[in-house]
Image: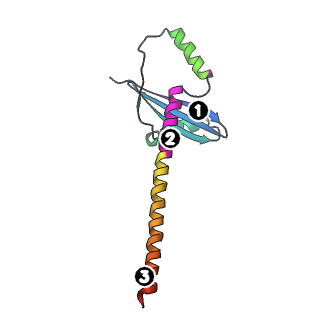
Amino acid sequence: MKKVAVKLTIYFEYPFWVGVFEKVEGNTLAICRVVFGSEPTNPEVYNFILKNYSKLEFTEKEEIEIKNKSINPKRMQREIGKQNKKKGIETKSQLLIQKQLKKNKLERKVTKKQKKILKEQRKFDIKQKKRKQKHKGR
């Protein structure tokens, strides 16, 4: 049976509040970054999760190693307290976000180049058509 865990971390990244969803399925990690704008309240976050979770675009799944070790309940409480005090997101999550941003940047670059080539081709075709129109009557 696969274990699935989803964690949402909300932090302030000037000038907006950002939420990072970390989804761990089995031994894979997928990340999604969401910009909230102004500081979201608990009900706003809850409604966002209910309405938009299925529409979120997670990064490609990355293999991670998971330790299956039973934890003492008191130690678990301490760990939860540390996580609540900690600001920001996990290092692996940051790396995945950077990887996704680079991928998106590359895709934009490719589409921009294709559009530029199409635009130049259209201009060239129009120029050729005008030249032929000028010499048509001779």
Task: Say which label, 1 or 2, has the lower sequence index.
Answer: 1
Label 1 to label 2, Cα distance in Å?
22 Å
Disc 3 marks which residue? 132
Disc 1 marks which residue? 10
| Labels 1, 3: front one | 3
Q: Badge 2, how many Cα within 10 Å: few under 14, some, many 20+? A: few
| Residue displayed at 62% across by 21% down | 85
Q: Is residue 72 placed above or below 125 in the rendered structure? A: above
**Is the residue under label 2 in contact with that under label 3 (CB below 8 Å)?**
no
Tag shown at residue 92: none
Asked which colour scheme the image uses, the reply is: rainbow
Secondary element under disc 2, as helix, strand or loop, is: helix
Name the magenta segment's main secondary structure: helix
**Is the residue under label 3 in contact with that under label 1 (CB below 8 Å)?**
no
Q: Which residues are magenta?
A: 85-105
* Relative depth, front residue between 3 and 105: 105
